[in-house]
Image (tube, helix red, strand yellow):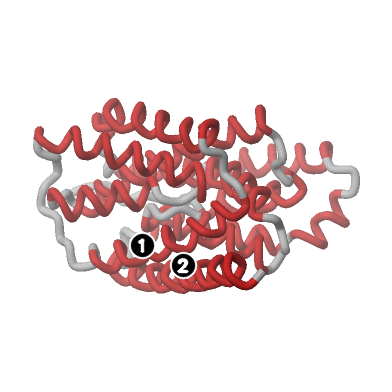
Amino acid sequence: MRQKFTYFTPWLLVFTLIWLVGYTIIFPDPIGLAAKNWPLIIVGLFGSFIGNTTAIGGGIIFIPVLMFVYKVDPISALKLTFVTQAVGMTSGSYGWIRRGDVPLHYLKWTVPALIFGTMISTFLIHPQPMLVKGLFGPIAFITGLLSLVTLNRKGLLNELPTNAFIPIISVSFIGGMITGWVAIGEGEIIAAFCMLAYGLNPNKAIGLGVVLLSINSLLLAIIHGAYLGGVPWNMAVFTMLGVLWGGLLGPFLTQWVSIRYIKKSFALIALLDGLIMTLQAIYMIFFI
């Protein structure tokens, strides 16, 4: 019998203390900044829980909240989401790997493909405000539909068949491109594909999707944070703390609560996000 995965680890406390020290040193008015932006910790916690339960990615929450509530421009919201997901999805990946639900041997096929796709969407076809707004809605809507479609998929296989490697490489490449534009896509697309096309066990499919989105987010965070710049760190510092603690909630709670019920709730959020963002993009294209 598999040992139950525990939520709290000493590393959570260690990284939180590191965050606290860094925050007080780097920002000139930490108390004033916290008074203004502390709700972003809750946003990060909730977004990371969604991202690591369904493999959709926390961007499904971060980007709409940042754009509609905090009035952040689409590109800054995208960049903030990259650095936030890098923390949250990595935290969740650690949890899924600890559970033993990640088929790590598939990474040698999927990671090069997602890197190639990410480079294309980052350096050849740059994310622009209208591209982010116009594409985020349909992608969010599609991921919501995929979550609903995969609700009843039991998935009896623990391994993909040998003829699946070229298709998952192609899907990972497409997911990498999409994630470079809207911060979501890689995880849910690869997870849904593995479940629908080959009947892979849902936990293993989601675990693989979470790890791939984590790697994708880390790559994009390095590119935008260290090279391209433009990350609103005064906000990202709070979402990053939230996702640090929220990332492990996904693999922890799915031991006790059926993924089916969680995915149904979050699929409705994705559908609503997608509909609102799509309608707004259409309005801006034809009426402004």
The residue where tag 1 is placed is 142
Q: Residue furthest front?
A: 286
Q: Quadrant of residue 175?
A: top left
Residue 27 bears which disc, if any? none
Disc 2 or 1, which lies upstream in sequence? 1
Q: Amino acid at mark 1?
A: Ile
**Contact (Cβ within 8 Å) of mark 2 with mark 1:** yes
Of 122 and 252, the residue lying toward us: 122
- In terms of secondary structure, where does tag 2 sit? helix
Please state the horizontal and vertical placement of residue 245, each as a whole percent of the image: 55, 52
Q: Residue at x 45, y 40 (%)?
A: 214
For this view, does 148 lie left or right of residue 230? Answer: left
The residue where tag 2 is placed is 274
Q: Quadrant of residue 145?
A: bottom left
Q: Is residue 170 above or below residue 182?
A: above
Please state the horizontal and vertical placement of residue 26, each as a whole percent of the image: 82, 37
Q: Amino acid at mark 2?
A: Gly
Of 84 and 45, the residue lying toward us: 84
For this view, does 205 lie left or right of residue 251? Answer: left
- In terms of secondary structure, where does tag 1 sit? helix
Please state the horizontal and vertical placement of residue 123, each as a whole percent of the image: 54, 31
